[in-house]
Amino acid sequence: MTFPLLIFIIFISVILALFEIQIEGKNGWAKNLPTWKIPNPFYKVINWKYLTDYHFYLWTFLLLVFQLPFFFGMKFNPKNEIILLETLFLTFILEDFLWFILNPKWGFKKIL
């Protein structure tokens, strides 16, 4: 992973975390949002009780955004796709961590 890519991941993760904090407030996982919630069919694999349309659309949008390099000249092949997907998943992980750190309800001191 290159240094500019790491900076990009950190930057976009901070922005996404702040964006979600503004939308969700102190309650994560779109608990109080007017959105549909369906039972998670993969509950035993991923310990989420339900899936929301908010998260589904956000993840779909980000997946498409992270595919943009292919439309601007990057050669499509399995190696490049894996690099983009691991960048996306690293962004998701860091964003979730930062949601707790930057959220005034939680904060760094309350987590530890």
Image (tube, grey):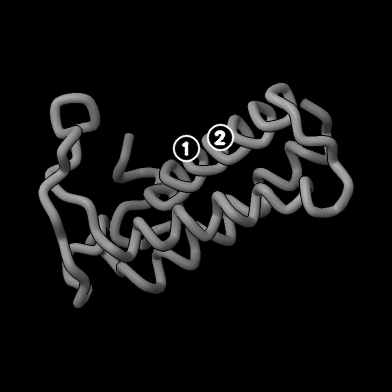
Quadrant of the image containing the C terminus: top left
Residue placed most toward the observer, 89 or 93: 89
Counting other residues with Cα less than 10 Å from the Cα at mark 2, is it few (<14), some (14-19), or many (20 or more)? some
Local secondary structure at mark 1: helix
Local secondary structure at mark 2: helix
Q: Is residue 29 left or right of residue 8?
A: left
- The residue at 64%/27% (across/down) is 82
User: Is the C-beta separation of discs 1 and 2 under 8 Å?
Assistant: yes
Rendering coords of residue 14 (x, y %):
58, 55
Above or below for 26 versus 5: below
Disc 1 to disc 2, C-alpha distance: 5 Å
Q: Is residue 22 left or right of residue 50?
A: right
Rendering coords of residue 43 (x, y %):
15, 33
> Which disc number belongs to residue 90?
2
Above or below for 32 versus 96: below
Residue placed most toward the observer, 77 or 60: 77
Q: To which residue does mark 1 refer?
A: 93
Above or below for 80 versus 101: above
Quadrant of the image containing the N terminus: top right
Counting other residues with Cα less than 10 Å from the Cα at mark 1, is it few (<14), some (14-19), or many (20 or more)? few
Q: Amino acid at mark 2?
A: Leu
